[in-house]
Amino acid sequence: MKVRGWMWATSWAVVVLWALVTLLVGLASLAALFTPTWFIRHAPSPPVMFGVWAWCVGGTEDQLCAAVGQGLGDSEAALPSSVWVMVGALYGGGGALLAVTGLSALLMPFLPTIHARAALAHVAGNIQAAAVSLQAVALVLYPLGLGSPFARLQCGVSASVYAAGSCEMGYAYMLALVATGLAAYCPVLARLITYKDYSDYWSNLNYM
C-alpha cells in the first residue's frame, strides 16, 4: 500500500545563500573595522574622522592619517580609549569567524553523507551565533570611548560616553551596524540547510 514518509535532504539553494550572506557580512565587517570613519567632525575646519584604530585629518586631497592617539601634522592627539582596543578585538574576531565559516560552505559538496553536512552546518551556525554576539557587544561598547581624552579633544568638551559632542556618526559605524544585523540571519540559514523531505512510497506491508 502507499504510505507517506520522510528522509533528510540538503537544500543547495540555502547553502549558496548562506555562503554568500556569510562572506558578504564577514568582508563588510572587516572593511568597516579598518575604515576610520566611525565618527566624523565636519566643523571647525579641518574635518576630522576616527574609527577603532586610525584617525584622519583633512579633506580627500590633503588628508593625513595615523593611529588613534598619535599626533598628526599640527593636530594634537590625546591618549585613545582603552575600550577601543577591546572593540577591535571583539568586532574583528567576529568578522574573521564569519568569513571563515562562510568558506566552510565550499566543503558541503564534498561531504559524503547528509549527516556530515548537517553536522558541519550545526557547528558553523553555532560559531556564527557567537560571532554575532561578539560584534553586537563591540558596537555597544564603542561609544563608551567618546568620553576619552582623544574623543573630547576632537569632538569638543561636550563629548562624553554615548554623546558625540560636535561629531556625528560616520558611514563605517553604520556599515558595521548593518553588517551585524544581517549576520544575525546566518545561524538561521545554517539551520535550514538540511530539512525533512516528505514523500509517498509503496510499502509491501499488509494492514488488517
Image (tube, helix red, strand yellow):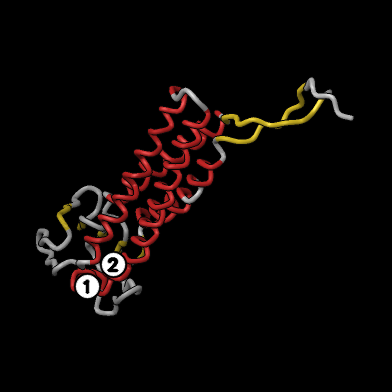
Quadrant where the C terminus lies?
top right
Q: Relative to the observer, which residue lies in front, 95 or 9?
A: 9
Residue at 20% across / 66% down in the picture? 82
Residue 19 percent across, percent down from the top left: 45, 35
Task: From the viewer's perspective, tell me whether residue 90 is left or right of residue 55.
Answer: right
User: Which mark, by number, is residue 43?
Assistant: 2
Quadrant where the N terminus lies?
top right
The kind of secondary structure element at disc 1 is loop
Q: Is residue 166 positioned above or below 131 on the image? A: below
Q: Nearer the viewer, mark 2 or mark 1?
A: 1
Q: Quadrant of residue 51?
A: bottom left
Residue at 19% across / 72% down in the picture? 153
Task: From the viewer's perspective, tell me whether residue 185 is left or right of residue 162.
Answer: right
Q: Which is more N-terminal, label 1 or label 2? A: 2
Q: Is residue 84 positioned above or below 60 on the image? A: below
Residue extending farthest to the front is 208
Name which residue type carries label 2.
Answer: Ala
User: Which mark, by number, is residue 117?
Assistant: none
Task: From the viewer's perspective, tell me whether residue 127 is left or right of residue 166.
Answer: right
Residue 73 appears in view: yes
Q: Relative to the observer, which residue lies in front, 23 or 127?
A: 127
Residue 94 percent across, percent down from the top left: 34, 50
Q: Quadrant of residue 195?
A: top right
Q: Which residue carries the number 1 mark?
A: 148
Residue at 11% across / 61% down in the picture? 70
Q: Is residue 166 positioned above or below 49 on the image? A: below
Q: Is residue 48 positioned above or below 148 on the image? A: above
